[in-house]
Amino acid sequence: MKRISTQAGCFLRILFVIVSLPALMLGQGARGQITGVVKDSSGALIPGAIVTVRNENTGLATSTVTQATGAYLIPGLTPGDYQVTAEVAGFKKLAIEGLKIDVGTTLTQDLMMEVGTVTEVVEVKGVANLVETTSGAVGTTVEMTHVLEIPVPDRNVYSLINLVPASFLKHRFGPAGNHLD
């Protein structure tokens, strides 16, 4: 009788680990974030502005309200192209399109609001940041077309790591899993 309950307990522990694993891995995903400060044309900070980030490919939108310092942060964004909009009473609505988020990157996009009515919209086309200024992390997104079209001599998908700037594949493995280096 005791042996059956031990086996059942072991089974329940394994089942618990399997069920909770996706929740634990959620923080390990390949995500990026957008942060910045909302200011007016004179440089004064604007608290209480509603900042919305919308994925241009999926249409999925996430909103936040700026803090007393005018700062905002929207984490957990999947790699892709985004549009950022900002709205607050007494100012024109601001929309910036074409902002690219890559794996593990933080895009800093400060927003400059112009005095006017909310019915007026200021549209800006985004330009990709050339330098990551918020951390020393390096990340990139390898497009599916590259994965399908680039010839990989050993048919090892990990060879594509060499496409990422400032990275290299440290160990090479042979067909039997043995080290070639």
Image (cartoon, rainbow, N blue to C red):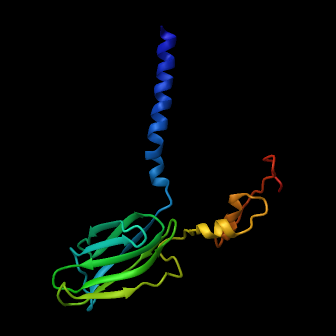
Q: Quadrant of residue 63?
A: bottom left
Would residue 20 be visible to someone looking at this image?
yes
Q: Is residue 107 above or below residue 159?
A: below
* Residue 58, x across and y down, in percent: 40, 67
Residue 30 position within the rendered picture, expressed as x and y whole percent measured from the top left: 51, 60
Query: Going by the picture, which residue comes out furthest to the right?
Result: 180
Q: Report the side of 22 relative to 66 (left or right).
A: right
Farthest residue to the top: give it: 1
Is 163 situated above or below 6?
A: below
Q: Residue at x 30, y 72 (%)?
A: 52
Q: Please say whether residue 142 is visible from this viewpoint.
A: no
Q: Position of residue 141 (x, y in %)?
A: 56, 68
Picture residue at 48% right of the left edge, 67% below the top: 79
Name the image quarter holding residue 48: bottom left
Left or right, residue 95 beside residue 28 = left
Q: Residue 172, position in %: x, y?
A: 77, 57
* Residue positioned 16% across, 81% down in the render: 89
Picture quadrant where residue 34 is located: bottom left
In the image, is 85 to the left or to the right of 173?
left
The residue positioned 35% from the left and 77% from the top of the image is 84
